[in-house]
Amino acid sequence: MSLTARNQVFTNMLETLSRDYLQGKEDVLRLSAIALLTGGHILIEDLPGLGKTTVALALAGITGLSFGRVQCTSDLLPSDITGLSIFNRDDGRFSFQHGPIFNNIVLLDEINRAMPRTQSAMLEAMEERRVTVEGVTHHLPEPFMVFATQNPSDQSGTFPLPESQLDRFLICTDIGYPEEILEKQIIAGGGIRERISEMMPLVTREEILAARRDVQSVYLSAKVLDYIYLLVSATRTDDLIQTGLSTRAAINLAQASKASAYLAGRDYVAPDDVKNMFQAVCAHRLVLRSEMSAIDRGGVLRTIASRIPLPLV
């Protein structure tokens, strides 16, 4: 299948999801597809009941990928995610029982309700695509993607994710309330979980892996690369920011911009791709000065982007 044909497959996938299943969630669906196409992970922060889990289920259903779910609670143990060795009396030896992390798409629901020790157990899986249990390394399937949700940090029973954990997520976004007319339609129609469970896949695993290779080959010009560097370096000298963006953030911004261009049907990154992905990829990585903690991090990035002119390419 050609690059253009694969691109059209993903375009049709997103159109089907937003038209038939998840109306009004075009932005989060597109960002989820970008995470999938880059081999990244996505974190969605919003109030309960706005469809975070449904988006993950729909993405797994329409891609036909294996799906695992972890409901994070304060008593969740690392072994509940990774799996553990169990003694088999019949053959007199231990055998490893895979945990839910051994799926293509893993939903970590309400991740910030898990204790920090359990949160840290996910780091190796997210970064290295493997887990080590009792000294033995087990590789995770490809493609592999963590789709995490979290409630706002001011809700009871939450443990804020450390910066090292947040940095593993390519994208962080929210969903928000739907518009009035759309919300009334959703209320009248009821839940769609049953319809999603019967969804027919529109994309194969092989097409996803091939599309990932296509995304890597999307052209990033020197001028656009300079633009990415200017955006990232500006966060390191801003008076509102205590810790600016890292080189990893710049790499992730370039990757997400390539995927954005790919979904738009282009084989090159335009400056607008970078500007449009800047907040979703980078806002959650910022550490503001303590006296500025109430300021919207996305707003800080929008201000920085407004000061740096788009390059002419």
Image (cartoon, helix red, strand yellow):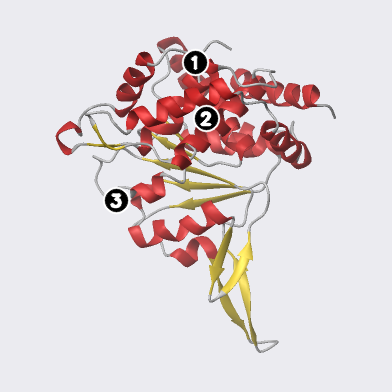
**Residue 99 percent coordinates (x, y):** 57, 62
Q: Amino acid at mark 1?
A: Gln
| CB atoms of marks 2 and 1 within 8 Å | no
Image point 63% across, 31% down: which residue?
Answer: 195
Q: Secondary structure at mark 2?
A: loop
Q: Is residue 53 at least partly visible in the picture? A: yes
Question: Does the residue at mark 1 contact the one at mark 3 (Cβ under 8 Å)?
Answer: no
Query: How crowded is the residue under tag 1: few (<14 C-alpha within 10 Å), some, or many (20+)?
Result: few
- Left or right of 147 on screen, residue 8: right
Quadrant of the rendered image containing residue 194: top right
| Residue sitting at x 57%, y 33% | 255
Task: Judge by depth and name the residue closer to the eye, 85 or 41.
Answer: 41
Query: What whole-number distance in Å separates the C-alpha atoms at marks 1 and 3?
Result: 35 Å
Query: What's the amino acid at mark 2?
Result: Gly
Query: What kind of residue is marked 3?
Result: Phe
In this view, the mark in front (1 or 3): 3
* Furthest residue toward bottom: 92
Callout count: 3
Above or below, 156 against 101 in this view is: above
Mark 3 secondary-structure assignment: loop
Q: Which mark is residue 185?
A: 1
For disc 3, the marked residue is 159
Q: Residue at coordinates 45% horizontally, 38% vertically from top-left? A: 249
- Residue drawn 24% across and 46% down? 156
Q: Is residue 223 left or right of residue 285?
A: right
Q: Give the residue number, with chain letter if any, for mark 2.
A: 191
Crowd tier of the residue under label 3, counting other residues whose Cα lies within 10 Å: few below 14, some 14–19, many 20 or above: some
Which quadrant is the N terminus positioned in? top right
Check the image and report above or below for 126 versus 2: below
Q: In the image, residue 125 lies at what x, y percent?
A: 54, 56
3D distance between C-alphas at marks 3 and 2: 30 Å
